[in-house]
Image (cartoon, grey):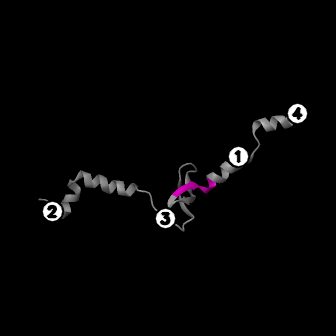
Amino acid sequence: MYGGRGLKHRNPAARRRREMEKLVAQHYTRNTVSAQAWCPKCGKQTMHRVDDRRIGPCLDCIAELERKHEEPAVDEKQDELFPK
């Protein structure tokens, strides 16, 4: 009745544990700098930075944020148009 083959299907705790193992994030070696992964923000496979052996932010998203921060603020643009 409690044979090895049928037991894995009857034990709900073991089933949940196997499902959670599938969701665990992949760990990388300390020498890994970047890896390809799915980016939910971009909606495609992109290169991601690896931080502390875990997948980090998307390199494309980082580049876009840096471009936005390099643009002058609205106040600076207004000062150029309307000097005080």
18 vs 1, left or right, is: right
Q: CA distance from mark 4 to mark 1?
A: 23 Å
Q: Is residue 59 magenta?
A: yes
* Badge 4 density bin: few <14, some 14–19, many ≥20, Cα 10 Å: few
Secondary element at image label 4: loop
Q: Quadrant of residue 11?
A: bottom left
| Residue type at tag 3 | Tyr
* Badge 1 density bin: few <14, some 14–19, many ≥20, Cα 10 Å: few
Q: CA distance from mark 4 to mark 3?
A: 53 Å
Query: Which tag, 2 or 4, sits closer to the chain's start?
Result: 2
Please name whichever residue, 1 or 52, is drawn nearer the observer in this view of the structure.
52
Please give the residue where the numbered disc 3 appears in the rendered image.
Answer: 28
Please give the residue where the numbered disc 1 appears in the rendered image.
Answer: 69
Give the position of the C terminus as an image quadrant.
top right
Please give the residue where the numbered disc 4 appears in the rendered image.
Answer: 83
Q: Quadrant of residue 47?
A: bottom right
Considering the whole magenta stretch, tell me its main secondary structure. Answer: strand
| Residue type at tag 4 | Pro
Query: Which tag, 4 or 1, sits closer to the chain's start?
Result: 1
Residue drawn at the location 85% of the way across and 37% of the way down: 80
Q: Residue 79: where, in percent of width, then height? A: 83, 35
Query: Which tag, 4 or 3, sits closer to the chain's start?
Result: 3
Please name whichever residue, 18 or 49, is drawn nearer the observer in this view of the structure.
49
Which of labels 2 and 4 is toward the front? 4
Q: Is residue 35 magenta?
A: no
83 vs 49, left or right, is: right
Q: CA distance from mark 2 to mark 1?
A: 62 Å
Please give the residue where the numbered disc 2 appears in the rendered image.
Answer: 3
